[in-house]
Amino acid sequence: MKRAAWRMLPIVVFTVALVAALAVNIVLASRSRIALASTILRNPATVRTARFHVVAILPDTVDPFYTHLIEGLREESEKQNAALQIFYYAPTAIGEASSTSEEVSRWFEIALRSKTDGIILFQPKGMDVLQFAKEADSRHIPFVPLAMDAPQAWTHSGVTGDSISQGKEASTLILGLLGSAARIGIILSSDTSQGYAFNEEPYYRGVEETLKNRPGAAIAAAVREEESILGGEDACARMLTEHPDINAILCIDAKATIGAAQVIIDRGNVGQIVIIGADENVEVNRLIERGVVHASIVRDAVAMGQSGVALVIGERIGIRSPERISVGYHVIPTRGAGP
């Protein structure tokens, strides 16, 4: 009799555990249903549904320009009641036309198949987006490419920066400090996809045009930064070695700015060579605060993102036609403030 009782004990224990687990599940399910009913089911108005679906295809990079670009895309998407979906392509593929084309094309095809209300693409280096524009148009999907500057081949809708104006602003700042004594070195982007020679680059042309009004001031040299993380530093060091008379350096982006500043610090030339940088991040701001960088011209990436979303939605609902938009910039620190 005792042996039979012992045999029943495991069965009893298992049954009790099973009942307890079932009771816990019932309680949890009940709580979930109560929470659901008190929010979504009873208050459907609190559930946000987007009217539009917008796809953005961007390089996967921590560059501050793209951080601000995404900020603008998100702000305008919320304003336009649009759901923003971002696809990223590898920045290491930029400049290698075949791999970039394959990766970006894959995301583009996915966006087309999703029947999105608009596609925004930051144009990779060396890529002709005309075919993308044709494919999107054939499916009646608004397509807006973004770029630092409008490629010469662009004939359709798009949003770009304005490097000519930025070059003019940078050289104006230098002339205000050094006047006719300015001997300027320019660090340009490594991007050669548009086929520009140094003197054809929009930023360079902006500087050159401003210097025409100040006899004596001159561009001493122009170099391209390399693709590597130290590309700006290497370019600046090479330029100063070949042209030791340079007393001002103008930079096209944050990487060039930080690299040039490091070279000036290492050589003990802080205060002797004026740096006008570009874009904004924690490191650039720190260099301005320390007086290593005099100022930075910040391309309005937020406005670029906002304009891109507003344009595709406007085209989608028929209140805007395809157009070319150029966004501006601002200077930090503001004139009359900081170093």
Image (spheres, rainbow, N blue to C red):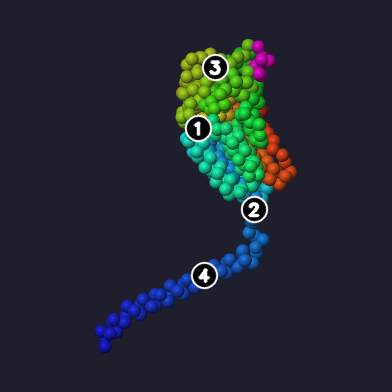
Asked whether the residues under the numbered discs 2 and 3 touch, taking CB atoms below 8 Å apart as contact, a structural biologist would say no
Is the residue under label 4 in contact with that under label 3 (CB below 8 Å)?
Answer: no
The local crowd at label 4, few if under 14, some if 14 to 19, many if 20 or more residues have their Cα within 10 Å, is: few
Tell me the element at label 4. Answer: helix
Q: Secondary structure at mark 1?
A: helix
Q: Residue at x 57, y 18 (%)?
A: 184
Residue that badge 1 annotates:
97
For the residues bearing labels 1 and 2, Cβ distance under 8 angstroms: no
Instruction: Give residue 206's position: percent from left, percent from top.
Output: 64, 22
Read off the residue under disc 4: 29
Looking at the rendering, the stretch of residues picked out in magenta corresponds to 209-215
Name the amino acid type tagged 3.
Answer: Ala
- Tell me how far mark 3 sits from mark 4, CA to CA: 72 Å
Q: Amino acid at mark 2?
A: Ala
Mark earlier in primary sequence (2, 3): 2
Instruction: Decide which of 53, 84 is in the foreground and name it.
Output: 53
Number of marks in picture: 4
Q: Is residue 213 magenta?
A: yes
Task: Tell me the number on the disc at residue 221.
Answer: 3
Quarter of the image for residue 9 reads bottom left
